[in-house]
Amino acid sequence: MFKKALFSLIAFTLILSFHAEKSQAKDSLILATATTGGTYYPVGVAIGTLTSIKLAKKYQITMTAINSAGSGENVQMLKNKEAQLAILQSLFGLNAYKGMGPYKGKAVKDFRSVSMLWENVEHFPLNQKAVKSGTISDLARIKGEKFSIGKRGSGTEGSGRTLMAALGIDPEKDMVLEFLGYTPSAQAMMDNRIIGANIPAGVPAAAITQLFAQMGDKKVKVLDFTDEQLAVIQKKYPIWNRYVIPAGTYPGQKTEINTISQPNFLAVHPDVSEETVYLITKTIYENLPFLANIHKATKVMNIKKAIAGLPVPLHPGAAKYYREVGIDIPASLL
């Protein structure tokens, strides 16, 4: 009798242990970001670190940020459940969810919104020897020159191609394409192996800081967008807006940069539980100073802008938190 009772107790303990491990594994989350020279990765690390510090002990929720090729790969990672969360460009989120652009006829619905994060600011650095007008139209004049459009399948490549196409620039004909991450792009420019690059990121972008510090504004120019060029882009893609980078943001930058930006947002797989997403959302907005200390780009985050411009519906866990703090959620996000 004793042996039978002991066996039952051991079996019960093993079952509890199995379920505990299963629950813990479910809440050991992966957050896909982008290459290390931009803004996605350090912000992702900050969100992952914050989540783990605040939620691991009491709720057994941890989050680890990993680098990736960016938004394009992140959409696929969410679909394949290789990551439970990801930072995405609004352009990629919108196109993927609605089956537009590169996702035409093959929509991806395996993600929901958690929160807007910060503005993804377009940086197109170009060697001064190729600068004519000082605007994005200069990219149509660098035939035969090597230009880094971003890693293959990345949000960087996708947004760069989208903007160029909107303005009548054909990257396949107007330049020789290289597919480099942010830091390798900056290094290649400094080594005179490429003429320019596409580096969309929160301000200040580490790779752009490196470029200005090493080359100076007499050798490198971040191209402007005119009001007319922005209007052409907005007609097709209203997610982009004017963004002015003040003089002095980057080393030796003597004049402001009149560029444009689109929002980035935090996405999550629908299978992540309502409670977990609720706790993550709550943790982010109750600890914004922590994020701001990690990267200046997150200083623009506040609860009043949390759902502004989100391209896909909210996860129920995020919606629950926003209702609690009094945010009116439009039907399109539910």
Image: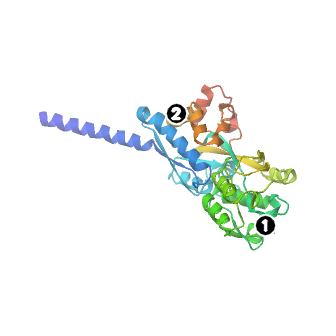
Q: Residue furthest bottom?
A: 144
Q: How many marks?
A: 2
- Classify 10 Å Cα crowding around label 2: few (below 14), some (14-19), many (20 and above): some
Q: Position of residue 17 (x, y in %)?
A: 31, 39
The residues bearing labels 2 and 1 have C-alpha atoms spaced at a distance of 51 Å
Residue at horizontal 75%, vertical 51%? 253
Q: Quadrant of residue 119?
A: top right
Residue toward you, 217 or 83: 217
- Residue on which disc 2 sits: 279
Look at the image and tell me in which quarter the N terminus lies. Answer: top left
Residue 134 appears in the picture as rendered: yes
Q: Position of residue 138 (x, y in %)?
A: 81, 63
Q: Quadrant of residue 333?
A: top right
**Secondary structure found at label 2:** helix
Look at the image and tell me in which quarter the C terminus lies. Answer: top right
- Residue on which disc 1 sits: 129
Residue toward you, 269 or 28: 28
Residue 1 appears in the picture as rendered: no
N-terminal of the pair, mark 2 or mark 1, is 1
Q: Position of residue 124 (x, y in %)?
A: 73, 57
Residue at horizontal 62%, vertical 61%? 153
Q: Position of residue 283 (x, y in %)?
A: 54, 33
Q: Left of 277 or right of it: where is 174? A: right
Q: Quadrant of residue 183?
A: bottom right
Query: In the rendered structure, which amino acid carries the disc numbered 1?
Result: Lys
Query: In the rendered structure, which amino acid carries the disc numbered 2?
Result: Leu
Q: Left of 328 or right of it: where is 13? A: left
- Classify 10 Å Cα crowding around label 1: few (below 14), some (14-19), many (20 and above): few
Of discs 2 and 1, which sits in the foreground? 1
Q: How is the image coloured?
A: rainbow
**Secondary structure found at label 1:** helix
